[in-house]
Image: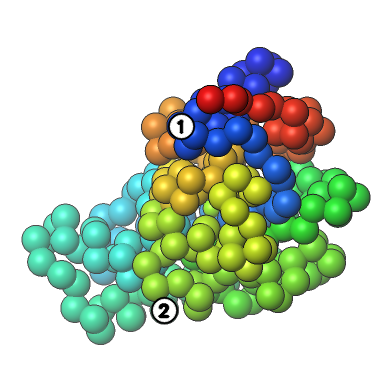
Amino acid sequence: MQESTIRNAVKRYLNRHSLTSIRLKTVLFDMDGVLFNSMPYHAEAWHRTMEAHGLHLSRIEAYLNEGRTGASTINTVYQRQYGTDAPEALIKQIYEEKAAMFHEHGETLPMEGSQELLRKLQRMSIPPVLVTGSGQLKLIDTLAHYFPNSFAKERMVTALDVKRGKPDPEPYLIGLSKASAKANEAIVIENAPLGVEAGHAAHIFTVAVNTGPIDGQVLLDAGADILFPSMQALCGKWELLHRILAETTVYS
Ligand code: MG
């Protein structure tokens, strides 16, 4: 990642929103596929559970739909096959089976580079906010173990807090309010196209990390301001990104 690439991305963002600068107060983190390497298990569980009910959702499609609520994912596939909404009881059954299969794989480990990035933020006194569409309380509880003193309870947005969910900007707007930050006082870290859409729609500078098998261009097309190939790559360039965010100013 070139310095000029980052600088141009920040300038484009500022011009788009008629802003003069970004004053970073917080970093809004997605969870699955960003903090935790959980997406391969989600994709596998989605594919197998749906298939068991005669519904076709490939693993790649599971990645592309990441961020949707479970009910919405099931209904989208059901609609595609049958042209009508899925029955409530079926949605509930499939979602329960999928969640059970996800938990069968055992402990989910942090994404490589994520713990180091959170330690860097701690040293810089930049408190993060969690913004996840997940309602997996077990995984959310694990945050305190792998990211000690990083995510305070009052700085978490989960499935329980939102009405619409990603790709709606709502979760990221709630995240901003939990940090008492404006859109240009935060950045979003996301791995999924729908999550990127949500960050973009909330008018926040959105950093995409392509930690899965999808084409990175999909993340840029969804509105990512900048794209890193992994969390490790982002962590390695964090100081540079932080400096450029602080020093780039646009005068209209
Ligand atoms: Mg994600």
Which residue is most to the right?
A: 123
Q: Position of residue 101 (x, y in %)?
A: 49, 70
Image side of residue 232 versus residue 17, left or right: right
Residue shown at the point (20%, 63%) measured from the top left = 78
Q: Is residue 214 above or below residue 86?
A: above
Image side of residue 5 versus residue 89, left or right: right
Q: Which mark is residue 96?
A: 2
Q: Position of residue 118 (x, y in %)?
A: 79, 52
Residue shown at the point (70%, 76%) measured from the top left = 153
Do we see residue 41 in this rendering? no
Do we see residue 187 in this rendering? yes
Quadrant assignment, res 240: top right
The type of residue carrying mark 1 is: Arg
Q: Position of residue 6 (x, y in %)?
A: 64, 24
* Quadrant the N terminus occupies: top right
Residue shown at the point (64%, 76%) measured from the top left = 138
Number of marks in picture:
2
**Secondary structure under the numbered disc 2 in the rendered image:** helix
The type of residue carrying mark 2 is: Glu
Q: Is residue 181 above or below residue 11?
A: below
Q: Residue under circle 1? A: 16
Judge depth for marks 2 and 1 and give the one in front: 1
Q: Which mark is residue 239?
A: none
**Secondary structure under the numbered disc 1 in the rendered image:** helix
